[in-house]
Amino acid sequence: MNLLAGKIVVVTGGAAGIGAAICRLFAGEGAKVVVADIDATLAKSLAEEISGLGIAVDVRDEEAVRAVFSECESAYGRLDILVNNAGIVPPQVNIWEIDLADWQVVLDINLRGAFLCTKHAMPLLKVHGGSILNMSSRMGLHGAPMQSHYSASKFAMRGLTESVAREAGPFGIRVNSICPGTVETERFRERIAGRAKAAGITEAKLIAESFTDPAALRRVVQPEEIAATALFLVSDAAAAITGEHIRIDAGR
């Protein structure tokens, strides 16, 4: 449908999982996509597939983040959409057992990264207006046991979304977030394998008891479904929506 024809997009954490699904869909809708990811090989591979630009970036590094938007401007002359998707889901652990360094890594990647990318995207976005989409989580709506560091980072992402929506609105920039539940990605499967082994049960049993049975739709979400909602939120179809958070969790 070419909903994003002529648009220039930066997607962080864009080389795999939800990020890759977003990159592919947006490119298919006519956008030129900058795939920004800590994995340079995957980023460049996907960028080649979708005729975009692949850039290696650690979103915790301000100079590296600054370089992403500089390269974007050099290559395409503008920026219309930023998707702050880069993030980490840490192992489950009680708060009294979390090492301070591990706590800081989660906050740095999930929150500091979104802050830095938003900060350095704004000068480009302010020229023509545009959209910022932040990736929060179902655990950014409801705290979960043994995930206090992750949940804190995702609650904060919603606060960042609402604050920047008010700041950026006068420049024609909309800012929203998506709050996914369980999404069937390769990393999800890796986490499930580890948890099932530790619990001494099958992966199928763990998925059923923890994820699909409690869900109204009796399934987990696919990355392409997150990408479809992302497309709506950054497109003109959502032109009057800003400061909003959309939960996508199959009805858990």
Image (tube, rainbow, N blue to C red):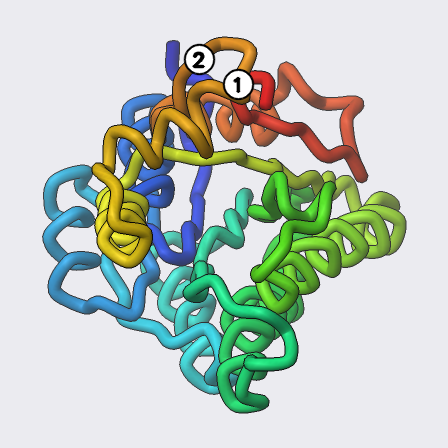
Is residue 86 left or right of 27 when viewed as pictured?
right
Question: For mark 2, what is the residue?
Answer: 218
The total of numbered circles placed on residues is 2
Q: Say which quadrant the N terminus sits in.
A: top left
Q: Say which quadrant the C terminus sits in.
A: top right
Would you say residue 61 is visible in this rendering?
yes
Which percent across, then down, holds residue 22? 37, 35
Give the vertical position of 218 relative to 93 (above or below): above
Residue found at x 23% / y 59%: 54
Residue found at x 66% / y 61%: 122
Which percent across, then down, holds residue 107? 59, 74
User: Which amino acid, mark 2?
Assistant: Arg
Give the vertical position of 173 relative to 190 (above or below): above
Residue found at x 68% / y 20%: 238
Contact, CB < 8 Å: mark 2 with mark 1? yes
User: Which amino acid, mark 1?
Assistant: Ala
For label 1, the SS is: loop
Out of 54 and 38, give the one closest to the viewer. 38
